[in-house]
Image: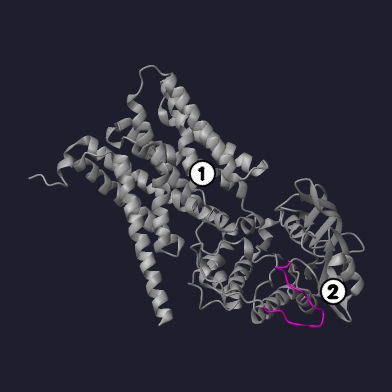
Amino acid sequence: MSALRESPSGEPQAGTQPAVRLTAVTAGYDHRPALEEIDLEIEPGSLVAIFGPNGGGKSTLLKLIADLIQPWSGTVEVLGEPAGRTAHRIAYVTQAELVDWSFPVSVWDVAMMGRYPRLGPWRRPAPVDYGAVAAALERVGMTELRSSQIGSLSGGQRRRAFLARAIASEPDLYLLDEPVTGVDVTTQEDLMALLASETAAGRTAIATTHDLAAAAEHFTTVVALNQRIIAVGPSSLVLDPEVLSKTYGGHLLVLGNQAVVMDDAHHHDSASGGEQHYHERPERR
Amino acid sequence: MLSPITEPLAYDFFLRALLASSMVGVVCAVIGSYMVLRGLAFMGDALSHAAFPGVVVAYLLKGPFYIGATVAAIATAVAIGWVTRRGNLRGDTAIGVLFAGMFALGIFLFSLIPNYVGDLFGFLFGEVLGIGFGDLVALVGLAFGVLAVIAILWKELLYTTFDPLGAAASGLPVAALDYLLLALIAVTIVVSLQAVGVVLVVAMLITPAATAQLLTRSFARLLAVAVGIGVVAPLVGLYASYWLNAASGATIVLVETALFLVALAFRLQQGRRRTHEVGA
């Protein structure tokens, strides 16, 4: 892994170029900028958390990398090519709130969708695809629940199913929008262990999170974001009061060695004292 | 001896109507399954009404009605999709405006035709018993065309319906697939116009899939049940309309509605039993 982390001081070569590079990127919605003048390089093999306040542009940054939105100015390069060209090497795990959980698909169906883009329109799933899906479900611990309709699962199981879809697509870059929000501690640990093993194998994972405890504990690199990049560095940055106060502005309360984020009501206070967050929501429809 | 089942089969018009309406039932059930999962019921209603001015213009120009209807419906679908993506209006607002406007245009043009009343009822409410051989061939051809596209792209359409962001990020052309589905809906509506007419097409599209959704929890079974209803309801409805001398399109839709109500009652019964078991 250290070889992959060497900074590309000389000529960019295959294998040593950054997994993601944004240069002077400004982007937003309806003439209102969400991100301004973003410069960011992410090395292959990194396990990156993007944190910051709501409306700070976390999801927007992820969508730029996924080529779901286009920058107003600046350039986005992903896996060595302009964003969008490498889509087949990307797995995007959608925020749970944006998914229709009553949809008539099983865990197996969801994981198999990860194979669809590489199959193309004419081909049906072949044994190699069944094998990849079965292996992915095994890795996320959902083999026994493979026939369950997704709406009948707990929040943690739903996230496992979506991670299985990502793994089944055999990507080089994982993009995860709030992967540890609303899941139980066990799922959070399992999910992060999986992402750690994927990044140890040279793949890259970038997640948004507003859970500072999770960012500090599970990620190797963190990006503090509030319309602009506030700081990039090791995960200990989320414990730095100066970075936190710059990132969250007036929404941060520092009490002794404990920082509490005063974000909107439905989001969660986050503590830097190594507290675990537990938000299991076993909703059923 | 002639039984109630075989007697109408002696008539060519009845055989043509049977073939046409079950073909319509199948295509509508397949396309409708995607529409129900995407929340496009209102869009279906809009496109069927939007086809009406195309029918009238085709009549005025003495061309085949399905070309006029296809052009009008697809143009409206593209316009709605464009306004929804680019404009600052909500999707249902754009649909409501264009739907009513196109239908009004159809009525307006129709009212300019002197002494022409006869076929209005047919276009609005369907006249499958009057379908000619040429129209039947066109209908079957178009229906197979729609089914062929779905057979090739069902996976991609399913993925983009379920999770458009995830599908787009992994490289599927989501915008193009959205437009394609709208075009398929438009063609399906045109195929169905003679069977059930402008006003009732939406029932053929939505009701079988909605019924299936009450009964199944997998996409493959949803499709199968919807298609089953799409075949059976027109058969039952046509016989009923023959023996009761009632409007065929409306009778077919009533059979589908009745099946939906039965499924709904079954579902509610199941839910109540489950609640009792949990409570006990």
Percent from the top left, x then y, of residue B143? 40, 42
- Quarter holding residue A88: bottom right
Subunit of label 2: A
The kind of residue on which mark 2 rests is Val
Magenta segment includes A92: no
Give the extent of the magenta segment: A265-278
* Left or right for B248, reference B243: right
Which secondary structure lies at badge 2?
helix
Subunit of label 1: B
Which residue lies under the disc numbered 1?
B43
| Quarter of the image where the N terminus of chain A is located | bottom right
Which secondary structure lies at badge 1?
helix
The kind of residue on which mark 1 rests is Met
Q: Residues within 10 Å of mark 1 (few under 14, many from 20)?
A: many
- Quarter holding residue B248: top left
Q: Say if B231 sits above or below B198 in the image.
A: below
Q: Residues within 10 Å of mark 2 (few under 14, many from 20)?
A: many
Which residue lies under the disc numbered 2?
A238
Which label is found at residue A17?
Answer: none
Percent from the top left, x then y, of residue B199? 41, 38
Q: Assess whether mark 1 and mark 2 are in contact (beta carbons under 8 angstroms).
A: no
Gap between marks 2 and 1, in whole Å? 48 Å
Q: Nearer the viewer, residue A102 or B19?
A: A102
Percent from the top left, x then y, of residue B99? 52, 36
Magenta segment includes A276: yes
- Residue occupying image coordinates x 82% and y 79%: A272
Q: Nearer the viewer, residue B232 or A101?
A: A101
